[in-house]
Amino acid sequence: MKFMGFDESFDVIVIGAGHAGCEAASAAARMGAETALVTLSLDTIGQMSCNPAVGGIAKGHLVREIDALGGIMGRVIDRTGIQFRLLNRSRGPAVQAPRAQADRALYRAEMRRTLEATPNLHLRQGLVIDLIVTDGRIQGVELQDTRRLRAKAVVLATGTFLNGLIHTGRRTYTAGRAGEPASIELAESLKRLGFPVGRLKTGTPPRLDGRTIDWSVFEPQPADERPVPFSFATERIEQPQITCYIGYTNERVHETIRANIHESPLYSGQIKGIGPRYCPSIEDKVVKFPDKTRHQLFLEPEGYETYEVYLNGFSTSMPAELQQELVHQIEGLEEARIIRPGYAIEYDFVDPRELTPFLETTRVRGLFFAGQINGTTGYEEAACQGLIAGINAALFVRGEPLFRLRREESYIGVLIDDLITNGVDEPYRMFTSRSENRLALRYDTADARLAPYGRRLGLVGDEDWERFNRRRERLARLRAVVEGTRFKRSDPTYAQLSQRLGQNLGDSITLAQLAQRPGAQPDLIYDLLPQEVRTQTSLSDLETVLADIIYSGYIEAQRATNERINQHDHIPIPANFNYRAISGLSREMVERLERARPETFGQARRIPGITHGALATLLVHLKLKRAA
């Protein structure tokens, strides 16, 4: 049925079925919006274009937060992960994070199955070439095959497809990723609408034929014996786990790269876009770290039913024949064959300072951006933006207040606040160090922080809500036991503990106090729990309770410090605030504030380049305005 010049009509249209688009479409549909997910190919929904892995430092925190809000990435990776590892086990709980290698094909198939089973969600294949906008409000989209789809809200999650340009040596060609066409007309449409567009770059390493690798040379990296799932709904990981391997480059490889650096489009001037600083190509590593004699590599199988191996740490855009020569110079890879060469890709992004905290654009009402179009890199960074954009697209359609997360309560809030306040000059990647409150934002507390929001939004169903409440009650009871169980000097257990730890434990000690002593690991505390409690407690629950106890003093001190420093952060700045009317602000400060459009004094304080004097002047005027 056609609708006033449109072939179909929906509440929400999501453009792009990468990690951002999948979360956006799922969220909007489950919130009751009739949603269309439009993608170039239905066969590449949830495609892992680079490393087939989810999680890692800070990224694992994002996935846990997505899951707590009711997103789907955590559940999909739990069903399709082939190697689970908790990173930073030897460090504090705040910086530990889950990571899982995925079976690329299974992940893609499971994501599509999940979306196809979602009520109100309709999959459409096609290339979007234009946005239909009337009087500053989105009306729908036009496809290359002439179809016009109507929508009250649109989420743009285009990944690297906007004006995508692939580089392999001196050869370049337009593509969104290898084997798929770039989205050129849509990129031009955004420029016509006045969006400021820049160029960024990312890359991928060669994939090797595992049958041609001498595995005996490499150091095995097995999966954890006790896999940590991503979803709070996953009881245990039951599928078989595989082993990855660690290797290294050598001076011979480095010398060959140096001798042929002119062949790299990164150094010939061919690539103009800025790449991710924290995921450099092998060329960058060799040039920027000349004193290093080797660089670490990870050989990661891409699935159960394939011989394809991802050579993590060897991203490159060198010519294909040179890539093969370099691979052969690595010990253990002398006979290895490349299945797919590595490449670099440049693509358009839009300055994220064009967005509100809800990921809605300021130029077009009802148009939301999510993922790499906002200057981020990584599946997890894209997925969390997609979730927020999908939620807000559905709320926009219903005419309800839009939803945001604060930076003090989530890494998602940190990411969005950083983007819309500071913009990007390189692909943005999440790190735990980006948060001032990272001690309170552990991966295992994401449900306590965010599940109530997911429930209120309608994304956390009855079963998951009951599970959340049971866990919350279980942790509260366990904490009472840990804080209340005390061993006195006269107890036989006391002497054993004192001898085992080699410490004077005082006249008496509780389990909570013992947990803060050097050498007192969670498994020791677990063994000391009363029998009736131990049978009803998992080690992971105990680890959460102990981390809460250990960090409680630090978190309280951090909170007090933040309150002193940030006591004025919540003062609002009116949307029409006239910075030019403040005589004490320089032209540069005015331009920075006008460009960032902070909504609060806290956002203004985090704008790069804003001086303390300018902030003091602004604060005085804001206080006067509130008092008036």
Image (cartoon, helix red, strand yellow):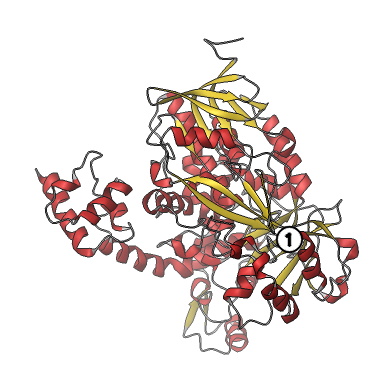
Q: Relative to 212, is 371 above or below?
A: above
Residue 358's x, y, as percent? 42, 39
Q: What residue type is labelled 1?
A: Pro
Left/right of residue 412 with respect to residue 210 in the rendered view: left
Residue name at image x 73 percent, y 79 percent: 250
Q: In which quarter of the image is residue 125?
A: top right
Instruction: Please state, as top left, top right, bottom left or bottom right, where the C terminus lies in the image.
Output: top left
Circle count: 1
Left/right of residue 145 with respect to residue 428 in the rendered view: right
Of the pair 508 and 460, the residue shown nearer to us: 460
Local crowd size for mark 1, using a 10 Å CA cut-off: few (<14), some (14–19), many (≥20): many
Residue 229's x, y, as percent? 67, 54
From this viewpoint, is residue 259 visible? Answer: yes
Determine whether the residue tagged by mark 1 lies in a helix, strand or loop. Answer: loop
From this viewpoint, is residue 32 visible? Answer: no
Q: Relative to 80, is 24 above or below?
A: above
Q: Relative to 389, is 378 above or below?
A: below
Residue name at image x 17 percent, y 55 percent: 585
Residue 426's x, y, as percent? 49, 57
Of the pair 365 and 487, the residue shown nearer to us: 365
Of the pair 250 and 37, the residue shown nearer to us: 250
Residue name at image x 58 percent, y 40 percent: 158
Residue 97's x, y, as percent? 59, 62
Instruction: Please state, as top left, top right, bottom left or bottom right, where the N terminus lies in the image.
Output: top right
- Where is mark 1, residue-wise? 319
Q: In which quarter of the image is residue 226?
A: bottom right
Of the pair 14 and 226, the residue shown nearer to us: 14
